[in-house]
Image: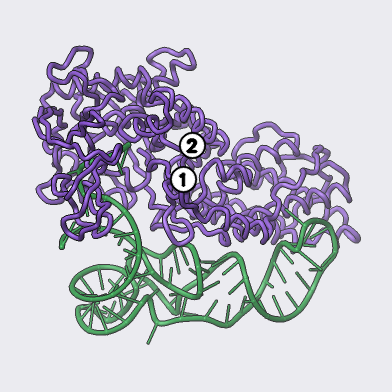
Amino acid sequence: MARILITSAIPYINGIKHLGNLVGSQLPADLFARYLRLRGHEVMFICATDEHGTPAEIAAQRDGVGVREYCDRMYEIQHHLGTGFRLSFDHFGRSSSDRNRQLTQHFAGRLADNGHISEVREQQLFSVADNRFLPDRYVRGTCPNCGYEQARGDQCENCTKQLNPTELINPRSEISGSTELEMRWTTHLFLRQSKFRNRLEEWIDSCDGWPILTSSIARKWLRDGDGLQDRGITRDLDWGIPVRRGNKDWPGMEGKVFYVWFDAPIEYISATAEWADANELDEAAWQRWWRTDLGADDVRYVQFMGKDNVPFHTLSFPVTIMGSGEPWKLVDHIKSFNFLNYDGGQFSTSLRRGVFMDQALDILPPDYWRWWLLSHAPEHSDSEFTWNNFVASVNKDLADVLGNFVRRVTKFCSARFGNEVPQGGDWSSEQSQFAAELAENVRRYATHMEDIEIRKAAQQLRLIWASGNEYLQTAAPWTSVKEDPARAATDISICMNLIRLIAVISEPFIPDFSSAIIKSLRLRSPAWPDDPEAALSAMTPGHEFDVPDLLFRKISDEECNEWQMRFSGEAGSNPPPNNDV
RNA sequence: GGGCCCGUAGCUCAAUGGUUAGAGCAGAGCGCUCAUAACGCUUUGGUUGGGGGUUCGAGUCCCUCCGGGCCUACCA
């Protein structure tokens, strides 16, 4: 038994996440966590909401509520949706927690004590009307390069030229539209990550098996231009973790907060502490996951995230850990994902284009989404959601191949032998051979799951489902029951046990299916089939069961067309942009 | 501008430099009748984006061009 710490990128607080966000971190992390628990390992699976920063402040302002209240509300919604998708977090925390405030301030103090923080005095654009400094992209104006009037202060979306907000012609505040902007002096803390360049590169070189996506993005940042740059870790905002040096004041930093990208990854640790608090456990309970001097030296730590988050997890957060000089657990494996596109374009929160987590659950149960998303996870390149593909895959895989197999076996058994596993005879060579092939297929599936090769695992799992139909077709018990009922009984017994085995091993992908079957078979949490051949006779003759209700209904063409129309996007509504840690 | 990733059958995707480039879906044919008209078997689809090179051998390595995507450090 091993101990595995799993974190999913923490979703930003302002709004409901779409399926692209879901499949990029939380869902694959859940798959992995569920699989490892199934194999008997000790797992700590952590996620949280990322609540600080300008977008949250503005969203709250737009809704006419305080930012704390706004976050409280959105936290509940996101938590509820996570449950709806059966995300099995051990704890779903909040980056605005007391734990995270204390720990973030602690890390900042340690980094400063070790000489890894510098203070930089610089000029930034201030909006008098809004009474706040503006991040570059919250300044709009006319692009000096192409004349586009809606250019953002960091980059013109029309001609893609990178800009400095001071270059814009007729600059104005994105928030209020005010043109009363001026440059003001301010001082910020910078994390001196440039000093860690060589150490980071050695570390990344030493990490085998990371996806190309992960290591290539990390190396790009290490080598680009003059190499890794120091990074500002404070902002002039009200909403965030107040800048303090450990538990002491930080002269000159009054009224400033830490930058979300500094405190968000620390929340992985804090959320584990929140978990201990919520379960009334002591400090040691969470520290054994994170402190290598307190038990975490045998923990394997795996992170899941979309490709946009890779720099923060391969560079800044490791520098925070390394620079603290304390024995915190560093990540072992970083599984990163490309993006999921929607019907020929990107998912877009601002345009309401695509399918969002709440809408998805309104139309279909979570297993449908989990299966499609995971079996099409964008592991090697961006992938695409289309309604036709979704409906075809789900109908074929879940309803025809899997659901129908369960149905035909249980109904046949019920009709011919009653609602119990029938008494058969010894296995024939065909039956033994099937068991041997099944053993090999389960072994391959397990290997893909351990390697976090999600598409391959899904493909292999589907193959196991299909093998049931193949076997049944060849055995043809509906024929043999007439002249050789014992043989038919043996075949049905094998198929009934195969259903049990499938229910167990499919649980990480489709947990609701799994629990429905286990209930119908009147079992309680059966273990992973270490010996699949023995598992094919685990339920002995006379074991009673109920024929399960229809497990997966088929989606009609009409529904497919209707959903395609409904989710094609609508102009008008304009919620704020949507991002994750 | 710079960098990275990707381009393989109608669609979604596989293939440590090594037999004849493989699966699933869709299409075609046959079979089965237990089952959600589901299932099984067989089968048609390829100049691996174009061109050049290295090699005994290239989907894979190099160069170049075309196309798509992402990142580019103050959104998160």
What whole-number distance in Å separates the C-alpha atoms at marks 1 and 2? 37 Å
Residue A476 seen in this snapshot: yes
Chain given the colour green: B
Q: Position of residue A429 (x, y in %)?
A: 71, 59
Type of colouring = by chain
How busy is the neighbourhood of tag 2: few (under 14 within 10 Å), some, or many (20 plus)?
many
Q: Which mark is residue A33?
A: 2
Name the residue at the right extreme: A482
How busy is the neighbourhood of tag 1: few (under 14 within 10 Å), some, or many (20 plus)?
few
> For mark 1, what is the residue?
A573
Residue A469, compared with residue A351, is above or below; it is below
Type of amino acid under label 2: Ala
Q: Position of residue A391 (x, y in %)?
A: 61, 58
Residue A219 seen in this snapshot: no
Q: Is disc 1 placed on a helix, strand or loop?
A: loop
* Horizontal arrangement in the rendering, residue A217 relative to residue A227 (left or right): right
Q: Earlier in the sequence, mark 1 or mark 2?
A: 2
Q: Position of residue A167 (x, y in %)?
A: 14, 49
Q: Chain of mark 1?
A: A
What is the drawing colour of chain A? purple
Of A553 and A279, the residue lying toward us:
A553
Residue A117, compared with residue B6, is above or below; it is above
- At 65% from the left edge and 35% from the top edge, which residue is drawn? A526
Residues at marks 1 and 2 touching, judged by CB atoms closer than 8 Å: no
- At 19% from the left edge and 40% from the top edge, which residue is drawn? A200
